[in-house]
Amino acid sequence: MSYLPEAPDLTQHHFFGTSHVEWRCTSEDRDLRGLIKFFEQAGYPYALYLVPGPDDRPYQIKHTIPDVDGVVCLGTFEPDRKKK
């Protein structure tokens, strides 16, 4: 039995990550693991969001947060500096 939730359909959602330096989102070329790896290697604290709609959907970003109805903050994360 698995306790992990079913992965969202990325044609209906995408992940958005942001730090105080830059932002990135999942796409055909970058999955969630790639997004997390990018922010871990950058070395700055970051936040991850689940955003309704495909990654090419246009929307505004206000104060580093996607301005979209239904956006969910998945958490803020501190990179593991021991891995650097």
Image (cartoon, helix red, strand yellow):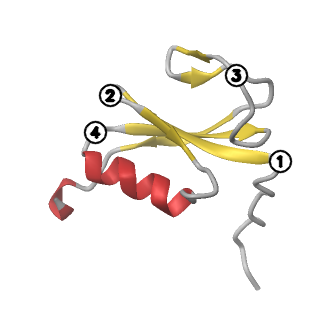
Look at label 4 and name its amino acid: Tyr
> What is the C-alpha distance between the residues marked 4 and 1?
29 Å
Residue corresponding to mark 2: 21
Q: Position of residue 64 (x, y in %)?
A: 50, 21
Density class for disc 1 (Cα within 10 Å; few <14, some 14-19, many ≥20) is few
Distance, label 3 to label 1, CA atoms, is 15 Å
Which residue is depicted at the point 78% across and 38% down? Answer: 52
Image spot of residue 38 (x, y percent): 37, 52
Looking at the rendered structure, the kind of residue marked 2 is: Val
Circles 3, 1 touching at the beta carbon (< 8 Å): no
Q: Is residue 80 left or right of residue 72?
A: left
Does the residue at mark 3 contact the one at mark 2 (Cβ under 8 Å)? Answer: no
Task: Tell me the SS state at disc 4.
Answer: loop
Find the distance from the CA under tag 1 to the CA under tag 2: 27 Å
Cβ–Cβ below 8 Å for labels 4 and 3? no
Residue 44 numbered tag: 4
Q: Which residue is mark 1?
A: 12
- The reply to whether the C-beta atoms of the residues labelled 4 and 1 are less than 8 Å apart is no
Q: CA distance from mark 4 to mark 3?
A: 24 Å
Q: Residue at x 72, y 25 (%)?
A: 58
CA gap between label 4 and label 2 equals 8 Å
